[in-house]
């Protein structure tokens, strides 16, 4: 059964199993009721009949008032495809067996193919023993299976894996709202999945006007690229005068290039040059965290580049995500969605640190970047990404860690060098996977048409540290 919730089908391994039963659990406020109603309304539009049963003391009017702010809720469909009934009084006065009888009658009368049971904790509290709990769940499941009905049990209790309810149902989805540092992060996990191959571990989600949107963890979702990775045997111009010669003809198509250097060394400017070589046949995209679209276009204007015209023509697209509170997997999902939707061939990511800042668990970054870059290669995107060096100058070069560098195809360093009491920008190609390149240091100039690679840097000592000294003849 299609869950109808963005990301939920993926983490469930294809959606809910028809006729199966699931527990959705989590603390109050985690989004259980929103999720269940979202699933109900979306599936109702697809032709299903939904029976929503509550064991809660609050009235349905209060529930509808809360749901009324969400896009999927349609008050006109109440009683027409979806029916809400409360069995709170029946449970209180007559017990669990009477609730089962009422559910049997209502499920058949409504012709329900989806049953939502909100308040499993109340039923659990009413049971005298674990056997009573198992009996109740089994009888609800039996009746639902008889009429081909999928069941969702909602509970605010954090049930253990060995609880009677867990042993009876086919799947368990847990929603969590946790405090990480000073920010709140929502994460979900499939704790049990019978009959389907679910994505393990935690996956971030958010609650907005559309309801829940789940962002599967990228390295789990794309453990392997979505399409076969086919090598492309041609090169794309970098858009920078003189750089293609250093790269032996340009950037290998479908490769990922890391451009690293300190602030002000020209990384963003080089990326604008790269995008300025875009066309209708090679659409480009800027995915950044620093400059707004207007500021980026002004910078291109100052460099004398035609980015504004390309943007107006739809050959270059600009997406900006400010460095505030982001979800790392949401950023990756948006990037890949727009790349596929727009048929992007040239991608400039400014900068990878934006993803790292959005991560609440830093040790996963190597796996995350590996999944992202593998997918970009497989779908034929030539990518340049930037990485900020911490120091303007010093005895060492703080390039990305070896594990991250090893998953990238090409490495280019930009740096300011102090030489004879003046700062000069230099560029060095450090790596081109499976290709020849010029390893010498070159001077970089800013002209009326962007960056320009000019002459090799005259012989000096210590250029890569940012503090150079002339060599004696």
Image (cartoon, helix red, strand yellow):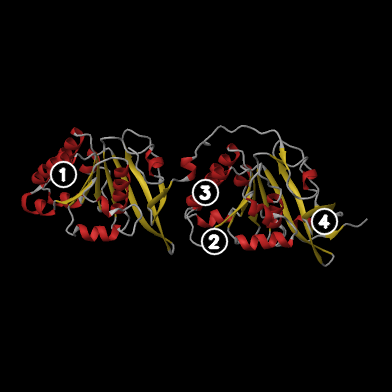
**Marks 4 and 2: which is nearer the front?**
2
Query: Contact, CB < 8 Å: mark 4 with mark 2?
Result: no
Q: Mark 3 points at which residue?
A: 332
- Residue 39 on image: x %, y %: 31, 46
Is 231 positioned to the left or the right of 77 in the image? right
Residue 78 in view (yes/no):
yes
Quadrant location of the C terminus?
A: bottom right
Badge 1 or badge 3: first in the primary sequence: 1
Tag 2 or tag 1, which sits nearer the N-term? 1
Mark 3 closeness class: few <14, some 14–19, many ≥20 residues within 10 Å: some
C-alpha distance separating marks 1 and 2: 48 Å
Q: Distance between the residues labelled 4 and 2?
A: 38 Å
- Residue at (76, 50) in percent of width and height: 240
Residue to which mark 1 is pinned = 133
Mark 4 or mark 1: which comes first in sequence? 1
Residue 461 numbered tag: 4
Residue at mark 4 to residue at mark 1: CA–CA distance: 78 Å
Identify the mark at residue 293; answer none if there is no mark. none
From the image, state whether disc 3 or disc 4 is nearer to you. 3
């Amino acid at each position: 059964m299609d869950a109808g919730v963005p990301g939920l089908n993926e983490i469930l391994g294809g959606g809910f199993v028809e006729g199966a039963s699931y527990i959705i659990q989590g603390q109050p406020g985690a989004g259980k009721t929103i999720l269940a109603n979202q699933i109900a309304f979306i599936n109702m539009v697809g032709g299903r009949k939904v029976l929503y049963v509550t064991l809660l003391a609050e009235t349905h009017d209060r529930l509808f008032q809360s749901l009324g702010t969400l896009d999927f809720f349609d008050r006109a469909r109440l009683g027409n495809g979806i029916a809400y009934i409360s069995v709170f009084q029946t449970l209180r006065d007559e017990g669990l067996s009477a609730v089962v009888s009422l559910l049997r009658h209502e499920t058949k009368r409504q012709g329900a193919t989806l049953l939502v049971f909100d308040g499993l904790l109340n039923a659990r509290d009413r049971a005298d023993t674990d056997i009573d709990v198992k009996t109740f769940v089994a009888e609800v499941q039996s009746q639902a299976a008889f009429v081909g009905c999928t069941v969702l049990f909602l509970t605010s209790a954090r049930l253990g894996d060995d609880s009677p309810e867990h042993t009876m149902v086919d799947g368990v989805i847990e929603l969590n709202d946790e405090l990480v540092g000073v920010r709140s992060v929502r994460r979900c996990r499939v704790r049990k999945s019978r009959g389907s191959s679910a994505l393990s571990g935690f996956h971030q989600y958010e609650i907005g006007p559309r309801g829940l949107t789940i962002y599967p963890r990228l390295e789990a979702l794309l453990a392997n690229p979505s399409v076969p990775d086919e090598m492309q045997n041609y090169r794309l111009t970098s858009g920078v005068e003189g750089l293609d010669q250093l790269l032996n003809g340009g950037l290998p198509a479908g490769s990922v290039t890391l451009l690293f250097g300190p602030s002000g060394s020209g990384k963003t400017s080089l990326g604008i040059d790269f995008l300025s070589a875009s066309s209708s046949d090679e659409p480009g995209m800027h995915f950044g965290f620093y400059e707004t679209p207007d500021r980026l276009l002004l910078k291109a204007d100052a460099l004398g580049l035609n980015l504004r015209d390309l943007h107006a023509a739809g050959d270059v697209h600009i997406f900006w995500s400010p460095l505030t509170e982001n979800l790392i997997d949401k950023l990756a999902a948006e990037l890949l969605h727009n790349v596929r939707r727009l048929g992007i061939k040239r991608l400039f990511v400014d900068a990878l640190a934006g993803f790292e800042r959005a991560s609440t668990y830093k040790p996963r970054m190597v796996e995350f970047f590996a999944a992202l870059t593998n997918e970009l290669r497989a779908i034929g995107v030539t990518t340049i990404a930037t990485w900020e060096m911490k120091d303007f100058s010093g005895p060492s070069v703080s390039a990305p860690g070896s594990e991250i560098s090893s998953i990238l195809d090409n490495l280019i360093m930009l740096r300011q060098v102090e030489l004879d009491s003046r700062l000069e920008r230099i560029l060095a190609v450090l790596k081109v996977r499976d290709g020849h390149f010029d390893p010498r240091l070159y001077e970089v100039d800013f002209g009326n048409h962007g960056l320009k690679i000019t002459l090799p840097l005259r012989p000096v000592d210590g250029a890569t540290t940012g503090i150079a000294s002339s060599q004696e003849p």
